[in-house]
Amino acid sequence: MGLLCIYVPEEVISAAGVLPWRITGSWEESTTQASFYRPEMTCRYCSHVLESVLAGDLDFLDGVATTQVDDDFKRLWDVLKYINKPPFQHIMYLPHTISKNTLGMWHRSVGEFIQAMEKFAGVTIKDDDILKQIEIYNQMRDLLHRVYQMRKNQTPPLTGSEVLSLTTAARIMPKEEFNLEVESLLPYLETRKPEMNNNKPRLLLCGEFLDNPDYVQIVEDAGAMVVMDELDTGSKYFTGMVDSSKDDPLGQLADRYMNRPGLSRMGDWHSQANQIIAWVKEYDVQGVVELRQLYSLPLDYRSFYLSKILEEVGIPYLSINREYHPSHMGMLSTRVEAFVEMIQ
Amino acid sequence: MVVCGVDIGSLSTKAVLMENDEILAWCIVPTGPDSVESAERAVGAVLGEENLALGHIGYTVATGYGRANVPFADKTISEISCHAAGSHWTFPEVRTILDMGGQDCKAIRCDENGRISNFIMNDKCAAGTGRYLERVADSLGLALDSIGPLSMAAVDEVLSVGSNCVVFAEGDIIRLQRASKKTNDILAGATDAIVERIVELLERVGVEPDLCISGGVAKNIGVVRRVEQKLGLRARIAKEPQIMGALGAALLAPKRQPG
């Protein structure tokens, strides 16, 4: 089951015996086929995903599930529905603010998703199935959290691009298998001594849907250590546990997806900025680098707000545009290098 | 110790040789298709002036867009830090630097020690860079170094020339020529257009005096005077504004021991 955003409760998919697979778009420069359906100046991630779908690169998927986290995702879903590719499509309605009413709407949306998955997989999903998956997913979240804790070390055992590869694996592997792998990785990481100079500035990386580790690499090649991220494809994917008590598994599951650190598309920028500031302190970060995907309007708007807030608390902040696929790396690295030289 | 800074820009490669606090030699050569060869040529020229060989250089810092390709460099530093260092060393009162190169334009703020505190860069588009002025000169059939003074002299009316795109600006110029407009008036419009973009960039980082203008475009009096006029201040310009990046690279060589 292909996933686009990080709001679809994956536990439901796994409980139906289906493998959740977060879709990575094509890394080719051109999105010629996608441009038949989408204007150029819209979310580049969505265009690259559509390009992959049209090129047949995602033919192994049986379905796709998303929320209308923003208009671009809704428009992408419209096209997928129209061309009927992958063969099953489901969209959940995600409220963009949290209140008693909107939470009720979200709970109903999760309920409808369960019914859709039951129909799709030809199974009945019971509360116990959900509870079992909550336990497995919580274990994954805990393991990734433990890996991230090691990034607080003076010299982290993993580079930022390695961590992105790890969270990418989490989003596509069967979770039980992934958990076993990370469990055996942890002792190794505890003893691993990377050849990293710990005098380098420690950075936090923002950038929502950042899939390509090359982008993290250019930040690290500029002479910095990426020790924390605020990426949907990184920390935001696994931060926040599901309450695993047996009272109301569905409600608890739904609540977790709304209560964890939000995307810029969720209007609550104040708490997002506070979360970044808290991470900056926790991970002993000297600067924040944001690689904003082109035409991601909510992130563009948030960056104005963020630059003001971070300036007030004296945290250096660099926010620059990037494509979804690796592109203009030389231009980006000049800016990041200058930023690193500035905070050194 | 003799240190060398080499700045491989998109159009020209600059090298500066320093010992302690003194510039021994500098040169500017056109950047060829092979940036390694251009760097070797530039460094060879400054060494030749001093009758020195590569082995005499204790430390080399490379900067500019071709910085990663210099095989004999000990270190690379971004051109943003280098321009700040070079301009600040030349004029210690400088807090804002405008560097206008062949293919990019940077507005940099620095503190009293020459350390950068903020910067903004346009290298995505040729409008607002030296390339724009080259194309303007070409389409009017004039030498590059003549268009600055001409844009200032005897202007009857400032004609409107597009600033958003070099190609459109050229289209505008051709249209104005067809309409038998005066070259000076066209040039005044084209120069106003580039200055509008430059001032926009400067205002985004905030201008604090002194302002230093460096890079090849600093040699265009028409651009410089208009920037000064718009901002209401006098800019500091080095005798050779094009070598500020290479000079900064040499200054930032870690083993340089000032006298």
Image: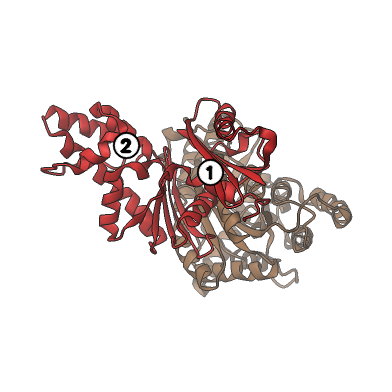
Chain colours: A brown, B red
Dot 2 or dot 1: first in sequence order is 2
The amino acid pointed to by label 2 is Leu
Tag of residue B246:
1
Residue A87 against residue A152 in the figure, above or below: above
Vertically, is B9 above or below B94? above
| Dot 2: element | helix
Residue A279: horizontal and vertical position, in percent? 65, 67
Circle nearer the viewer, 2 or 1? 1
Query: Which quadrant holds residue B258?
Result: bottom right
Please tell me how crowded label 1 is: few (under 14), some (14-19), or many (20+) other residues with Cα within 10 Å: many
Residue at the outermost front position: B51
- The quadrant of the rendering that contains the N terminus of chain A is top right
Exactly how many numbered labels are in the figure?
Answer: 2
The answer to whether any part of residue A70 appears in the image is: no
Q: Amino acid at mark 1?
A: Ala
Q: Residue at x 56, y 52 (%)?
A: A338
Q: Secondary structure at mark 1?
A: helix
Query: Where residue B196 appears, x then y in whole percent?
Result: 29, 50
According to the picture, the residue beneath numbered tag 2 turns out to be: B133
